[in-house]
Amino acid sequence: MGHFITFEGPEGSGKTTIISKVYEQLVKTYDAIVTREPGGIAISELIREILLAKGNDMDARTEALLFAAARRQHLIEKVVPALKADKIVLCDRFVDSSIAYQGFARGIGTDEVMSINRFAIEDYMPDLTIYLKLDPEVGLRRIESNNRDHNRLDAEEISFHRDVVLGYNELSDNNPERIKIVDADQSPEKVAADALEIINQYLEQGVNQS
Ligand code: TMP
C-alpha cells in the first residue's frame, strides 16, 4: 500500500499552493499524485458544483451527505487504486473537513457526521494529515486580496469560519499522531518546507519500520 496524506485548513490557508510545492519535491523521489475533495474525478466534480453554487439554501444534512457521497466515489475510483499501486496520494481535504465544517460550524455534531462518513469511507483514513493552521480573519483577507470568487461556503459569516478553526483545533488535539500542525501564517516557501519536513520524517519512519 502507498501513503495517504491529506491537507486540511480553513479558507485561504493556502492548501492548493502548498500541495503543489510539496508535490514538486516529492515526485523527484516518489511516485505521487495530487487530488482534491470535493472533486478529483468526474462524478465528484459534478457534486462539487452543486455544493459550491451560490444562491442555494441547502439543508445542513443534505450538504453533509453530498460531501460524503463525493468522498466515497473519489476514494473508490481514485484514491484506493493509487494506494494499491503503492503511490503517495496528496489529497486536498478529506473527512476532517466534514467534521470541522459540517460537524462543528454547521452544528450537526462530530458523531453524526462521522457516522455517515463511516458508511462512505469504511476503514480508510489518512496515514498523515497536515493541518495548515491560520486565523480565519487572515485567511478571508487573503481570499479578498487574491480576488478569488467566494463560493457558497467561504461566503459564510466570520463566526462560521471561527467554528471551522475550533473544529480543526479539537481534531488535532485529539489526534496528535496523525494530524500535524503547520503554521500557515508564513511565506508559502516556508510553509511548504515545514510540511515537507514532516512528510519526509513520516516516510523515513515508514521505510525504517518495514
Ligand atoms: P476548497 O475551497 O478547499 O476546494 O473546498 C471547497 C469548500 O468545501 C470549502 O469551503 C470547504 C468545504 N468543505 C466542506 O464544508 N466539507 C467537506 O467535507 C469538504 C471536503 C469541503
Image (tube, helix red, strand yellow):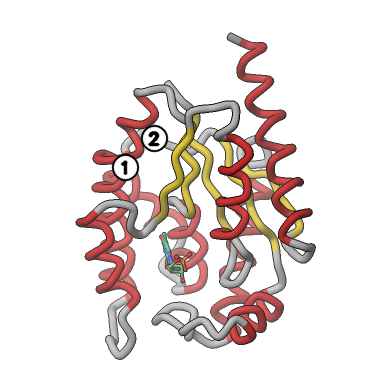
Q: Work out whether mark 2 precedes mark 1 in sequence or the reverse, and give the earlier one.
A: 1
Distance in Å between CA atoms under marks 2 and 1:
9 Å
Callout 1 secondary element: helix
- Tell me if 18 is positioned left or right of 125 in this view: right
What's the residue type where badge 1 is placed?
Answer: Leu
Label 1: which residue?
Answer: 75
Which residue of the protein is positioned furthest toward the bottom in this rendering?
A: 55
Q: Is residue 69 left or right of residue 5?
A: left
> Is the C-beta separation of discs 2 and 1 under 8 Å?
yes
Q: Please, what is the three-letter code of the amino acid marked with disc 2?
A: Tyr
Q: Which is more toward the observer, 137 or 29?
A: 29
In which quadrant of the rendered image does the N terminus lie? top left
Q: Answer few, some or many: residues within 10 Å of disc 2's Cα (few below 14, many 20 plus, some between 14 and 19).
A: few
Q: Residue at x 63, y 39 (%)?
A: 25
Residue 64 drawn at (x, y percent)? 33, 64
At 60% from the left and 71% from the top, the residue drawn is 12
